Structure formats: structure tokens, C-alpha cells
Image (cartoon, rainbow, N blue to C red):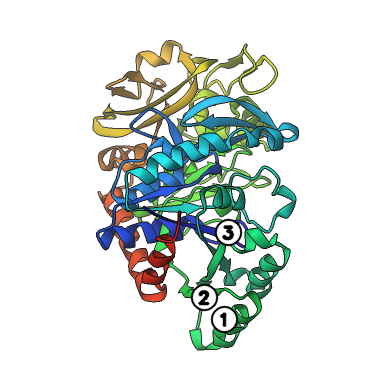
Amino acid sequence: MAALMLQGTGSDVGKSVLVAGLCRALSNRGLNVRPFKPQNMSNNAAVTENGGEIGRAQALQALACRVAPHTDMNPVLLKPQADRTSQLVVHGKVRGTLHAGNYREARKALLGDVMTSYRRLRAGCDLVLVEGAGSPAEINLRAGDIANMGFARAADVPVILVGDIDRGGVIAAVVGTRAVLDPADAAMIRGFLINKFRGDPALFADGYAQIEERSGWRGHGLIPWLRDAARLPSEDAVVLERGLPGHGGGKLIACPMLPRIANFDDLDPLKLEPGVTVAMIPPGQPLPGDAALVILPGSKATIADLAGLREQGWDIDLLAHHRRGGAILGICGGYQMLGRTIADPHGIEGPPGSAAGLGLLDVETELTRNKALRPAQGMALGAEISGYEMHMGVTTGADTASPFALLNTGPDGAVAPGGRVLGTYLHGLFASTGLRRAVLDRIGVASTGSDYAGAVDAALDAVAGELETHVDIPALIALAQEAS
């Protein structure tokens, strides 16, 4: 069996998209491929058929392989819930909470879990494509590492280093990585890829050759800016900080960027609708007064994010929006915020306590130790719907007598009298064409009825096609076959 790992010169160099595109390209070549990320840190997660959760990127990469996502594809997932603490998910299940001070020691014990998942995956396929996290050049984090070279050396998997030319300094980034690495770590790297190139490739021919000469690594491709990648769901909140969409026409849907925003990819299918513009509202800006719909998104720390929402004055904006007759939809943590109270008696998110909600739904929530993780389907607003639940908490109250959805798992969510305020625990809801149409109809927008799943699949094929053109894929396959 074969394996190959992509590591980066830094974060956000495009590793996740490249692994997804290569998964699809290799699948198109008839190979049985599986994605793998030893350790991920993200609040955008997906639920697997075996009742666990993994990073959203690995779920997308599984789709690229044309297989169902599995918890073995991302055995360790860290979900930040405060500035210095993260929820630890191992093999899809919550194992506890880690603090910044104890994580280095704790992660050493996780290598066994990582290797167990990797061996199971590798035994059932032709090739495993592994994605690193951050960069191996962060040598201050090398001791006990399980995400980059710590895994590569333990599993004896050859590495390709990815550099991002769009951010500048890519020659120094690649050559500098070689300079700071321990010789045994550097020996694991067998080549490099240059990603996000714009313009005439001939203009970088000398730079490419300089990287090969100074690093001693062979280049395996100069990859252009992959425009179709914008049609793929994003995993990391960093994409929200790189430039926010303006109001380009049609009706405005506004979503506040909560400090611990989670699963914001729920909104991605709305990009298919030319009749609306989705605006992610950053801290320091008010919720737009002309918004037709405000969506309160998921949160990894609901009570803390509710306090953050109030600090920004967004609660005042939201109540004014409601008085003007605007529609409001809360998803998961956003649903909990819309109620009367949120109680955390067990200290799930922090110190035990409770907080007053926004009071727009007659419901109350108690956070519980048990985490609901399950795919779900049924009917909502008169339309067929499917998605997944991923939450800690039970919500009850008068408005749940008018549920948002009737799912195979039972009634879900709540709708306030008048129908302008809605809440649901269901993630991925807008991928259901009928539900998207029903929600947009409430704000007077005609949906195109576009197939979101089909659009994502087409984007994966388009990215794979670009990689077939610009990457020496046969050479990568040959390297992968050298894995022990």
C-alpha cells in the first residue's frame, strides 16, 4: 500500500484543497484513495455515518475520493472554545478539554491513536493522501509533534512541501524550511509544489530552478490560482478574514462573525443564489439595517459568543431588525442564543453558570455532557431536508410546539408566532434545495433550485483537471509507493 503527505511552508497555503483535488484526480485514475489528517484544529466539522465528527476538510476530501467520511480520516480534532482551551475529539468522540499549557504533553499520548487510524485506513485502500497541519518549520513545536514530521517519521511516509507564491517570499519559505529542519526531518521531504500562481509561468522559471538548486528538492509542479476552489466549502475561519463580500445585488443576508463561530460553511449553498448576497459581518461593524434575513451561526462556546455579540451591540441591531419585520434564523448555537436562557450547570463551556438569551424564541437551553452527533433527514417548512446534528444541549419551551423540522430523530427546533424567528439544530440545511427555496421565499427571493452537491462535485472535478495539467502526478504516485 502507498502513502504520501503534503505539508506546507505555513498555514493556509492550500494543502486542504490540493489534497482534495489530488484525491479526485487519483480516484479518476481508478485508484482506491483515502484522505488522512493526523491532527486538525477547526470548529468547522462534519458528522460521519459511524456517529463521530471530523474536520470539514476531511469530509470534503472523502467526497473527492467518492467514499463516505469516516472518523479514521481525522483521528484527532481540536475545537477551540476559548482563547487557551480546546475540546479534544479522538476517533470522533469528545475525550475532554485541553489547555494550552498541557497540550504538548497530552499530544504525545495521542500518537498511538493516530497510528491506529492510519493503519486501518491504509489496509483498506491503494493509497493514503495525508495532510499536515501548519508547518514543519515551526520547530518550536517539534517535540511530541503528531501533525507533521512526528507523524511522517513514525509512519515512514514521504513528504511533498507546498509553498504559497501568492503571499510572497515563496523562495525563502521553501529554502528556509530546509534550513531550519533537523536533517532527519528534511530527509523526509522528497519534493515541493508551488501553489496559487498568477500570470505567466515563464516569469518564475528561474525562481523555480533556484528553489530546486538551493533546497536540493525536486519541483513537482507550479499550480495556478484554482478559481474553482472558491466553490468548495471552507474549513478555517481565516477565510472570513481575507476579504468580506459586499452587497453585490439582490436581498442581503447578514451573518455576524462570532468570536468562536462554528460550521459557517452552512451558508455556502446560498452562494448559488444570485437573488441574495451573503455578508459576513466582522467585529466593529453593525448588522446592516437593510438585511432581509439575519442568520445567527453555530458557536463552539455559546454563552461566551452571546456575550461577544452583546459587546458588539449586535443584540441591539438584531432587535431593531426584528421590530422592522426582518426574518431571523438561528442555527445550533445561534438557535440557543435566540431563547430566554442558556444554562451551563456542569461547566461544559467554562465555569458553571447561565446567561439570559435574546428572548426572541420562547425556549430555554441547558448544556449537557452528552453530545448529539448524527445524520438526520425529514421535512422542514414543507420541504425535504437532510443534514446533521452536532451539539451539546437540550432546548425546551413553548415555541418547540411549533418545530422547525420533523426529522427521523424527532421534532427539531422552534418557530415563533408569526414565523419570522426560527431556530434549528440542523447543520447543512441549505444544501437541501427545497429548504433553501422555502427560506428564500420567506424573504421574497425566488431560488434558482441549483444542486449544491452537484456544484461541489463539479468543482472537485475542475480542480482535479487543473492538477492533472500542472502537477507531475505519476511522479507523486511513484513517491507514494516508496512508503513503508
The residue tagged 2 is 219
Residue 298, x across and y down, in percent = 51, 34
Q: Residues within 10 Å of mark 3 (few under 14, many from 20)?
A: few
Q: CA distance from mark 1 to mark 2?
A: 7 Å
* Disc 3 residue type (three-letter): Gly
Task: Classify residue 322 as left or right of residue 315.
Answer: left
Q: At 63% across and 56% down in the image, what residue appears?
A: 135
Is the Cβ of the residue at disc 1 closer than 8 Å to that at disc 3?
no
Is the Cβ of the residue at disc 1 closer than 8 Å to that at disc 2?
yes
Task: Classify residue 440 as left or right of residue 256.
Answer: left
* Disc 1 residue type (three-letter): Tyr
Report the disc number at residue 208. Answer: 1
Q: CA distance from mark 2 to mark 3?
A: 31 Å
Q: Tell me the element at label 3.
A: loop
Mark 1 vs 2, N-terminal side: 1
Residue 157, x across and y down, in percent = 50, 55
Is the Cβ of the residue at disc 2 closer than 8 Å to that at disc 3?
no
Q: Tell me the element at label 2.
A: strand
Looking at the picture, tell me which residue is in the foreground, 315 or 411: 411
Q: At 53% across and 15% down in the image, what residue appears?
A: 368
Mark 1 or 2: in front is 2
The residue tagged 3 is 243
Looking at the picture, tell me which residue is in the foreground, 181 or 340: 181
Give the vertical position of 349 relative to 4 (above or below): above
Residue 231, x across and y down, in percent = 39, 57
Task: Classify residue 77 as left or right of residue 383.
Answer: right
Report the disc number at residue 463. Answer: none
Q: Tell me the element at label 1.
A: helix
Mark 2 vs 3, N-terminal side: 2
Mark 1 vs 3, N-terminal side: 1
